[in-house]
Amino acid sequence: MAWVTKDSVEQYETPESKKEYTKQEKAANWWYYHKLYVGIAVIAVVLVVWMVHDVVTRVRPDYRVGYVGSSNLPTDTVTALENTLAAYCDDRNGDGKVVVELVQYNLDFDSESENTDAYTQMADVTRLSADLSSEDGPYIFIMQDTDYAQQFAETTGDLQYLDGTMPDTENVDENDNVIVDWTKMVYRWTDCPALTGLDLGTYTGLTMVDDLQGENQDIMKNTYIGRRAYYTDKTALESETYDALWNILTAGAVSTVGQQ
């Protein structure tokens, strides 16, 4: 207690009462300090849900077939090939359905071509190189025409011979490309009775901007088909699972490649 003298007067200060906040004010204050953490948490939850959904709903193909050409096949042709080939395949991954995926690679083997999109070329070359190095890549390849069959076989060295033997990887040219006889690695589509006999139906629209119509077999008649070479135990094992499909598609085939 303060002493009172003639020169001082005792004073008392009344303490201020503590402010009572409403629920809305408390919520606003909490949100002000925590909104960043809430936002981060929401984004994290959304990402987790998206990844789980993607894993659960993603369609995993049992077989992958590659197509190498200057542009994509018509959408109707792709669908017809996938659905028709699935009838000759089995459910390898055990998910209860048989799915064949046609993987398309848009390549231009003419490096000086002015019509080549450099970014698309780089992306598809990178994707093809990765798939040829992986056991998950396609093991059966369809090539657009004679030039693409020859260029693909000679540039990659990744097709096996029709008799099932592999290229000699020690036999290379000055550019380190494996020297092969591409004419003994592929069949023409029209060499294979099973392929020409597929009921592929019709297409509407060669591209996304036209409505041309025609037979899908007419799209495929100039193509070639070959089987991927394998150089490791893993790819050899994977290749064996494709042998049954290859044998069905090429049953009765007589190669006319290389004949004038």
Image (cartoon, rainbow, N blue to C red):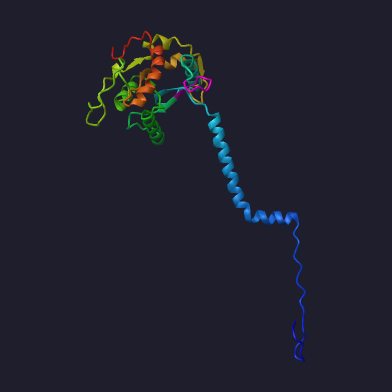
Q: Quadrant of residue 229?
A: top left
**Residue 65 within the magenta-colored segment of the rendering:** no
Residue 227 in the image: above or below residue 31: above
Q: Quadrant of residue 224?
A: top left
Give the percent coordinates (x, y) of residue 57: 55, 29
Foreground residue among 161 and 67: 161
Q: Main secondary structure of the magenta part?
A: loop
Looking at the rendered image, the quarter that the C terminus falls into is top left
**Residue 93 within the magenta-colored segment of the rendering:** yes
Foreground residue among 229 and 105: 229
Foreground residue among 242 and 4: 4
User: Can you name the residue that lies furthest to the front here?
Assistant: 1
Foreground residue among 47 and 234: 234
In this rendering, does residue 14 appear at all?
yes
* Apparent side of residue 175 relative to residue 24 in the rendered image (left or right): left
Residue 139 in the image: above or below residue 10: above
Give the percent coordinates (x, y) of residue 154: 29, 25
Give the percent coordinates (x, y) of residue 141: 38, 21
Residue 164 in the image: above or below residue 34: above
Residue 221 in the image: above or below residue 104: above
* Apparent side of residue 202 relative to residue 233 in the rendered image (left or right): right
Give me the residue at 29% from left, 21% from top: 166
* Apparent side of residue 23 relative to residue 260 in the rendered image (left or right): right
Q: Quadrant of residue 113?
A: top left
Looking at the rendered image, the quarter that the N terminus falls into is bottom right
Looking at the rendered structure, the number of numbered marks drawn on it comes to 0
> Which residues lie in the magenta part?
92-102
